Image (cartoon, grey):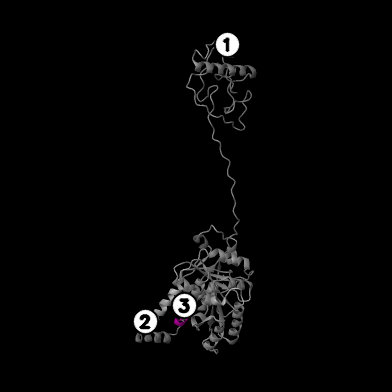
Amino acid sequence: MTQGEQRHGLPSADGGDWQRDVLRELGDAVGDDRSKTGAGDDGRGTAPVRPGEPALRLAHPAPPRPAVTVAGEGTGSGGPQAPGLVSPGPVSPSAPGAPGGPASTVPAPGARAVGEPGPERPVTPAAPVPVRGPRLPPAPESSPTLDPRLLLALGRPLHGDPVTRRTGRALRRLASSVAQEVTEQTRIAREVQQPVTTGRVVAVTSIRGGVGKSTVSALLGHALNHYRHDPVLTLEADAALGTLPVRMGAKAVRWTCADLASILHPSMHLTDVTGYLVPVSSGGWLLPASRGQVGPPLDMTSYRKVTLALRRYFAVTVVDCETLPGEVARTAMDTAHARVVVSPATAEGVNATRQVLDWLARLPHSALATTVVALVSDTPDALLDDRTAAGHLGEVGVTVVTVPYDRHLAGGGPIRTDLVAHATQQAVLRLAAEVMGRAVRVR
């Protein structure tokens, strides 16, 4: 028999009601604690249990629950509090069960019986520490590509072909068969639309500024956007106040090539990338090199990072490079899949372009095989014969495409493809076909 059974003469648990024996033993144990501390069973000030008097109601034992200790609530008014119990606060001396008050064997509403485990309190998990990613630079302010007063000064753009030339071409088409022309156009369009397995990069450069490099880049971008059904990007890598955004028809620019170099990461999708680009009216996108202000030039590391990252999203990238022998231009010409060297239709321009071609021939890989020369005429009264100039440049084994004078392009400002001269459209389409044919063959 236990000490409680010997003290009160209670029947043993082997022959009596085991539930009543357990409750009596609990009552005796709590009574001994009260006699030592002078407090209630759980620090609430209840009266000591009298011998032979049940302190608890008989109930079906609940399944055991793990006790939860609440920080800061482990002590009551009379001493240490049992784990899992929360002190409800001071008790009035006149309340039943308080020291000096009437004893009660029935727990108050909401009170817990002696020995009954307290309700589990949900343990609030600690707030997760936020994982901070790379700190993105603040979004730059949008800048207009041209001053509004200059837009008014441009006036109405001219058509590349005068009215008499357009009328004569229309009459010739009525009098002759157009089957041969349609066949040639179909062949060229098929070359431009060649599928690619990975993104192709076409670099456009020249030996000096002002020869039509950005104009040729914009025309190539418009032609590829028109004929191809996959994404095409026109990228400006000339931070020296380049005119590519103006020629592409962009009214304002915000993010530049250098800005995007610190933002791009492999987890970005095409929709994420295009949010930093300028949409072009012909269907592609534009990434400028500056916001129309003099700033630091584009470095080679940023250029390589941007071009390598964007090749995943765009089938063709037309890069308007700086003039040779700049560092970025040399890197772009060396790493591109196809190259376009823009040469002015002048004697000194053709001579300097020939020197560039000789330099390309000395590169470790065969760069001349993927190079096309665009011979651009910027005046209607050219003194240099186009055939003689093309023959001199073609001696090293490159293809030369002559881009004739176009008064719509000579006027500057945004390029409208519907106003470009017919001969210029044909030359640009042939240039795009030659470039794509070489870019696809390169692995």
The magenta stretch spans which residues?
Answer: 417-429
Label 2 sits on a secondary structure element that is: helix
1 or 2: tag closer to the N-terminus: 1
Q: Is residue 136 above or below residue 115?
A: below
Query: Amino acid under label 1?
Result: Gln
Residue that mark 1 sits on: 6
Q: Is any atom of residue 284 visible in this view?
A: yes
Nearest-to-viewer mark from 2 and 3: 2
Q: Is residue 436 above or below residue 73?
A: below
Q: Is residue 119 above or below residue 414?
A: above
The residues bearing labels 1 and 2 have C-alpha atoms spaced at a distance of 122 Å
2 or 3: tag closer to the N-terminus: 2
Q: Residues within 10 Å of mark 3 (few under 14, many from 20)?
A: many
> 426 and 68: which one is in front?
426
* Place of residue 399 in the rendered image (x, y in percent of width and height, measured from the top left): 52, 81
Residue that mark 3 sits on: 429
Residue that mark 2 sits on: 179
